[in-house]
Amino acid sequence: MMRILVVKTSSMGDVLHTLPALSDAQTAHPGIRFDWIVEDAFQQIPSWHGAVDRVIPVALRTWRKNPAQWFGKDVRRLIQSLRGRYYSHIIDAQGLVKSALISRLARGSRYGYSFGTVRETLAATAYNHRVSVPRRLHAVRRVRDLFAASLGYAQQDTSPDYGIEIDKLPRAEPDQHQYLVFVHASSWPSKRWPEEFWHELVELATAARYRVRLPWGNEIEREQARSMAHNHAGAEVLPAMDLGRLASVIAQAKAVVSVDTGLAHLAAAIGTPNITVYGATDPELTGTAGRRQLHLTARFPCSPCLSKRCAYTEASAVKPACYATVSPLQVWGTLQAYIEQGQA
């Protein structure tokens, strides 16, 4: 039996983008099994795939804020855990110096992107085997190609199979009402569709007798969600919940409207119809991938800027300025057509 260690720690979208590569490998090598090193905030995600036996959580973001923890008991426990098992392949799908260093803690032959295609060049020095994968491919395809070359099988040009076993998700209470999920929050300010646009979209949806559910990740996002739901009886701000419960809510939704953020990729992985609005980022490289995914892209001179913060200084009706080209009426019209066509 092939035993593989996957190093892909973050972020949520990147972790989800790795799942189809496991499904490919499982098809090519029946019986293959995986262990996976991942940030503790995302440790539920690998466990949803049937080929993953062990999830090894790390707290790199916490350790980065306090370098002394690199010598603490948590790191010693990680080293002990990794050294206790030999892997036929250690695949660093992250391509960063931090992930390359983690890969060196484990026992086995290390695989990763080549010097010209890795995200951080120094990371490639840690690998025994380097795979050249073009940078201009979609993120899901890059990881699939990396696994195919590392594990010795031909990559098929098929739709990504995330391999999520729905029965592994927490069971949600049955909902007799059709509802939409609107994902408004992102860690990048430049990815955020204007809040006033979300207000208008909530009004359009509730006027059409849809219920709207609004997830959030921190107090600022929760207050924004409360503002969007204000005076709309059909809009509900979700309570705090973990990724598993959020996945169940998304799985039962009629459709999702989102910005380019982790929950958008979660909807794609589950197969829920999803319309994602893009301004700062390029859906050709990092957009949601899978069945029933639509991309609405801003048409603006500096889009996609690939910058976390909008640098546009001219006068504009909204901020970030590029989203003036993706109006609430356009999003709502696209969503209605999608539903009427039976896609959602």
Image: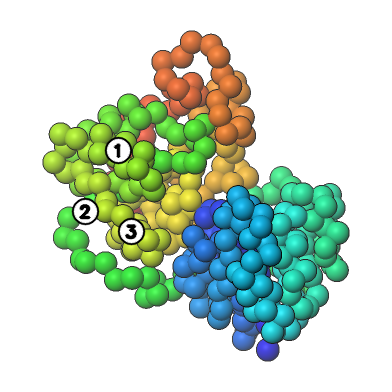
Q: Is residue 85 above or below residue 328?
A: below
Horizontal arrangement in the rendering, residue 204 relative to residue 156 (left or right): left
Q: Could you say which disc has been placed on residue 178 in the image?
A: 2
Q: Nearer the viewer, residue 209 or 18?
A: 18
Q: Left of 238 or right of it: where is 6?
A: right
Numbered disc 1: secondary structure: helix
Tell us which disc is closer to us: 2 or 3: 3
Among the two numbered marks 2 and 3 on one chain, the one whose residue lies closer to the N terminus = 2
Residue 140 in view of the camera: no
Residue at image mark 1: 223
Q: Which quarter of the image is occupied by the N terminus?
A: bottom right
Q: Amino acid at mark 3?
A: Met
Q: Position of residue 17 (x, y in %)?
A: 57, 58
Look at 33% across and 58% down and name the residue there.
241
Which secondary structure, mark 2?
loop
Q: Which numbered mark, 2 or 1, is in the foreground of this view? A: 1
Q: Nearer the viewer, residue 159 or 96?
A: 96
Q: Amino acid at mark 2?
A: Gln
Which residue in the structure is indicated by mark 3? 241
